Amino acid sequence: MGLPGSGKTSLAKELVPMLKAKWINADEVRKNANDWDFSEEGRKRQAIRMAKLAENLKKEGNIVVADFICPTPNARSLFNPDFIIWMDTIKKGRFEDTNKMFVNPNKYDVRVTEKNKEQWAKKIKQLILKE
């Protein structure tokens, strides 16, 4: 999770092949649902869609990487990840409404504080696979 432009998708692109994971990208999910509502309610719908997709892939035995903003505690409560990466690399994203809505998470497994996808992907892989 993280603000737009924080590096979520870049990190996911690096991490997915390392984990041999399935990838759920929020922009693609929104595009497929044709739902571009970024209100609190729209974000809840998105979290539910993302959660359902992730759970289905996980039930098939996959590791799943889901990259999306998930800006509020309420939206986060609708998505039940096993491992949370907070992309805390920027203080403001390109969308003011999202900046105003985004609440820094209290709960996460890794807090990424600088854009270095290769370095962070290696660290996160080791944590997830317990290498």
Image: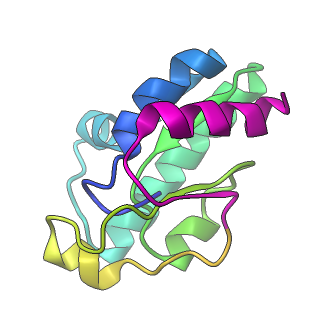
| Quadrant in which residue 102 is drawn | bottom left
Give the percent coordinates (x, y) of residue 6.
Answer: 32, 55
| Residue at the image position 41 percent from the left and 55 percent from the top | 114
- Left or right: residue 113 versus residue 27 is right
- Left or right: residue 82 versus residue 101 is right
- Left or right: residue 100 versus residue 129 is left
Give the vertical position of 122 relative to 49 (above or below): above
| Quadrant in which residue 60 is drawn | top right
| Residue at the image position 24 percent from the left and 73 percent from the top | 92
Residue 78 lies in the magenta-colored region: no
| Residue at the image position 24 percent from the left and 37 percent from the top | 31
| Residue at the image position 68 percent from the left and 71 percent from the top | 107
Q: How many marks?
A: 0
Given residues 54 and 68, the one toward you in this image is: 68
Give the percent coordinates (x, y) of residue 51.
Answer: 58, 47
Give the vertical position of 29 relative to 74 (above or below): above
**Please, which residue is most extreme toward the bottom here?**
100
> Is residue 62 visible in the rendered structure shown here?
yes
Give the percent coordinates (x, y) of residue 16.
Answer: 53, 23
* Numbered range of the magenta stretch: 108-131
Pick the quarter of the image with the C terminus: top right
Colouring rule applied to residues: rainbow
> Is residue 53 visible in the rendered structure shown here?
no
Given residues 60 and 111, the one toward you in this image is: 111
Residue 130 lies in the magenta-colored region: yes
